[in-house]
Amino acid sequence: MLFVQRGRIYWQKTKDEVNVEVREALESHTAQWQEILRLE
């Protein structure tokens, strides 16, 4: 599966690897949004 991250193209061999990347990205974005909402 090909996907783009920060302007680069990565090739992931397994769905599990992709899922880990996506899950980590979502968790980091969620944490950032929680911090932003907490400040408002």
Image (spheres, grey):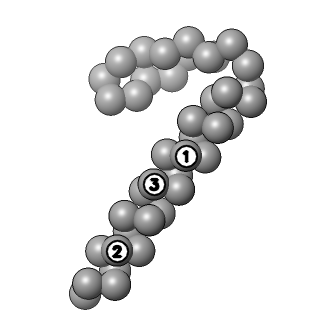
Where residue 18 sits: x, y (%)?
Answer: 64, 29
Q: Residue at x 49, y 16 (%)?
A: 10
- Judge the density around disc 3: few (<14), some (14-19), many (≥20) Cα neighbours within 10 Å: few
Instruction: Tally the numbered discs.
Output: 3
Location of residue 13 with respect to 29 vertically, above or below: above
Q: Could you tell me which secondary element the residue under label 1 belongs to?
A: helix
Return the mark for residue 40.
none
Badges 1 and 3: C-beta atoms under 8 Å apart? yes
- Judge the density around disc 2: few (<14), some (14-19), many (≥20) Cα neighbours within 10 Å: few
Q: Could you tell me which secondary element the residue under label 2 belongs to?
A: helix
Direction left: furthest residue = 40
Return the mark for residue 35.
2
Q: Quadrant of residue 15?
A: top right
- Judge the density around disc 1: few (<14), some (14-19), many (≥20) Cα neighbours within 10 Å: few
Where residue 6 sits: x, y (%)?
Answer: 32, 29
In the rendered structure, which amino acid carries the disc numbered 2? Answer: Glu
Where residue 31 sits: x, y (%)?
Answer: 44, 65
Q: Residue at x 56, y 12 (%)?
A: 11
Image position of 16 (left or right of 9): right
In the rendered structure, which amino acid carries the disc numbered 1? Answer: Glu
Looking at marks 2 and 1 on the same chain, the residue that comes earlier in the sequence is marked by 1
Q: Quadrant of residue 28?
A: bottom left
Looking at marks 2 and 3 on the same chain, the residue that comes earlier in the sequence is marked by 3
The residue where tag 1 is placed is: 24
Q: Quadrant of residue 34?
A: bottom left
Location of residue 36 with respect to 19 vertically, above or below: below
Q: Could you tell me which secondary element the residue under label 3 belongs to?
A: helix
Return the mark for residue 28.
3
In the rendered structure, which amino acid carries the disc numbered 3? Answer: Ser
Q: Quadrant of the N terminus?
A: top right
